[in-house]
Image (cartoon, rainbow, N blue to C red):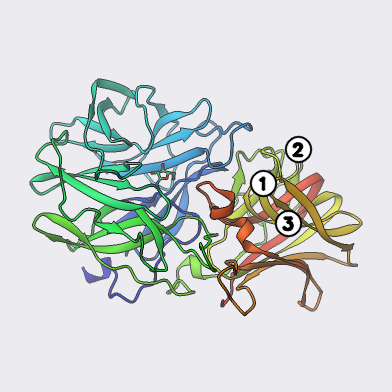
Amino acid sequence: MSDQRPADASFTTPVVPGFHPDPSVCRVGDDYYLACSSFEYFPGIPLFHSRDLVHWTQIGNALDRPEQLRLPSAMPSSAGIYAPTLRHHDGRFWLIVTNCSEGGGNLLVTATDPAGPWSDPTWLPGVKGIDPDLAWDEDGTCWCTVAGVSQVAIDPSTGRTLGEYRRLWSGGPGAKAPEAPHLYRIGAYWYLLIAEGGTERGHGVSIARSLTPNGPFEPCPANPILTHRGTDHPVQNTGHGDLVQAPDGSWWMVFLGVRPRGGTPGWHVLGRETFLAPVTWEDGWPVVGELLAPGDDVPGDDAFGEPFHDDFDLSELHPSWISVRDRSPEHCTTKERPDSLTLRARGASLDEPDAVFIGRRQQHPACRARTSIDPAQGCGGLAVRLDEQHHYGIEADGAQVRVVSRVGSVRAVVAAQPVPAGPIVLGVRITEPPAPHDARTGPDVISLGIELPDGTFTSLATLDGRYLSTEVAGGFTGRVIGLYAAQGVVHFDWFGYEPLKA
Ligand code: 6LW
């Protein structure tokens, strides 16, 4: 069964690059499935499939219908869908998650095929707290454990809580934010895996065990079993893990981490990404092996190392496309003009929650994205988005091409020129900052420009990438590169994204 696990230590992490935090994993036979958080984006909860834990392909999104996911327009970015737990039990996939927006709460969806369709949500009004976990004990009781860490029995078919909450464990002394609990029966013990220290540089994973699912829990003497705090490892903020056993009996942990770059204090721009490390067992405790430093490329033939191109010739969009808060056919469709994506503005710029924007996660430190736009009936463009207050865009209307920068409360047009004759191809190139590098050098630079018919890229402006980083903008997401309509109707003939050598 050696093909069911990474063949050697030569794979490069992250295994799911770009803003894919809070991974939860489960295995059914030879197949692994993984789910991540999605916050203010729709559809919610990207789902991936793998046969080896290293190469993951997106197979769908668990919350892809408005009936399952409503994100109010007043909701701030980085609210919305937090930290799912994905499990397989009794012939079905179960996914429990928190919608941290008004009218939200904890919800559970199920599917027989993880590619979908997923059920409408069962709400769990009695479950208070984020990062819900599901575990079934031998007598069939379903335990829901939440950040804090506390636990209550639930009836997963109705969402009702059964009995009282029980406090289980709050992690190591002095560590903040005991969260992301996952409870597993492994051998004679029940193990409670948690994250602690917060999702920033102090992040880590700790574990405790008990002979029952309800405690008392004995902490592992080697806690935290995973942390990169205080190290110069290129992957930082490691935490929020989930364990899985391969068919050959080996154990693995998926967890989130970030890749800060530039001078001090370091800026990460791709959000929290999903990493993988081997796990061995000593004296009944898991020992997390070294993950390797990431290179510039994700190896192998997986989708993440490959360019992505969309001619918009299919009626359904690829599952990796995500919109801000919702995606109504009135505002975003491939059915209006053949082989085109049509975006219809709703009177809001990218600075507002109601923006019409559809993008894909930036997954590589260096990359380029391009699109061919027809702005004859409106104004729209190509943007690198961190949130409403942090984005750079290159946009066109019938007369002008402009680079627009929004950083904090300041919005500025930083360059403009008349629209070129013929088809308009807008481009963004994200590369390393030019040398020399010093303590204040940013993580990258973002050039926004137009492409001439011979393929030459002409930059209109090159902007510092730090302002589109989590350390500047705050929040839980990462950069998303995509298309928007600021006014009227705009059509896009194609979109392309390619990793570049740094
Ligand atoms: C999530 C928490 C965390 O709920 O960040 O890193 C929060 N861990 O467990 C949002 O992703």
> Which quadrant is home to the C terminus?
bottom right
Q: Could you tell me if the residues under marks 2 and 1 are in contact, i.e. CB atoms within 8 Å?
A: no
Q: What is the x, y in percent for residue 407? A: 69, 51
User: Alpha-carbon neighbours of circle 1 within 10 Å: few (<14), some, or many (≥20)?
Assistant: many
382 shown above or below 430: above
Q: Secondary structure at mark 2?
A: loop
The circle drawn on residue 393 is: 3
Q: Which amino acid is tagged 2?
A: Arg
Rendering quarter of residue 434: bottom right
Q: Is residue 75 left or right of residue 213?
A: right
Q: Could you tell me if the residues under marks 3 and 2 are in contact, i.e. CB atoms within 8 Å?
A: no
Question: Is residue 378 at least partly visible in the picture?
Answer: yes
Q: Which amino acid is tagged 3?
A: Gly
Q: Secondary structure at mark 1?
A: loop
Of the numbered discs 2 and 1, the one sitting upstream in the chain is 2
- The quadrant where ligand 1 appears is top left
Of the numbered discs 3 and 2, the one sitting upstream in the chain is 2
Q: Which amino acid is tagged 1?
A: Gln
Q: Which residue is mark 2?
A: 346
* Front-lying residue, 204 or 180: 204
How far, Cα to Cα, is label 3 from label 2? 18 Å
Q: What is the x, y in percent for residue 415? A: 83, 62
* Front-lying residue, 171 or 363: 171
Q: Which residue is mark 1?
A: 389
Question: Is residue 318 at least partly visible in the picture?
Answer: no
User: Alpha-carbon neighbours of circle 2 within 10 Å: few (<14), some, or many (≥20)?
Assistant: some
